[in-house]
Image (cartoon, rainbow, N blue to C red):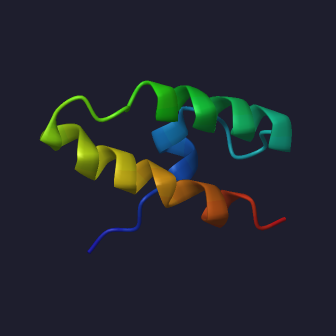
């Protein structure tokens, strides 16, 4: 099982500020609103990102 790079998923650099992380997270979340059942899994994956990235 490979380790996922959450910063890469959000499309930001690892040195991003908390504000940049929040902005990218919200943008990704809004683009993943579940319209179809397929999007539900993608939404769950993105929702797991915030707690892992916000451990400063």
Depth check, front residue: 49 or 11: 49
At 38% from the left and 55% from the top, the residue drawn is 45
Q: Is residue 38 left or right of residue 29?
A: left
Which percent across, then down, holds residue 53? 67, 58
Identity of the residue furthest to the bottom in this view:
1
Q: Can you say which quadrant of the picture contains the N terminus?
A: bottom left
The answer to whether residue 27 shows anywhere in this view is yes
The answer to whether residue 17 shows anywhere in this view is no
Q: Can you say which quadrant of the picture contains the C terminus?
A: bottom right
- Location of residue 26 by image quarter: top right
Q: Is residue 24 left or right of residue 30?
A: right
Q: Is residue 42 above or below residue 11?
A: below
Q: Is residue 18 above or below residue 4?
A: above
At 52% from the left and 52% from the top, the residue drawn is 6
Q: Is residue 31 above or below residue 13?
A: above
Which percent across, then down, holds residue 15? 78, 44
């Amino acid at each position: 099982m490979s380790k996922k790079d959450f910063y890469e998923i959000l499309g930001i650099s690892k040195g991003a500020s908390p504000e940049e992380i929040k902005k990218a997270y919200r943008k990704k979340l809004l683009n993943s609103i579940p319209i179809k059942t397929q999007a539900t899994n993608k939404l769950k994956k993105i929702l797991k990102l915030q707690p892992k990235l916000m451990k400063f």
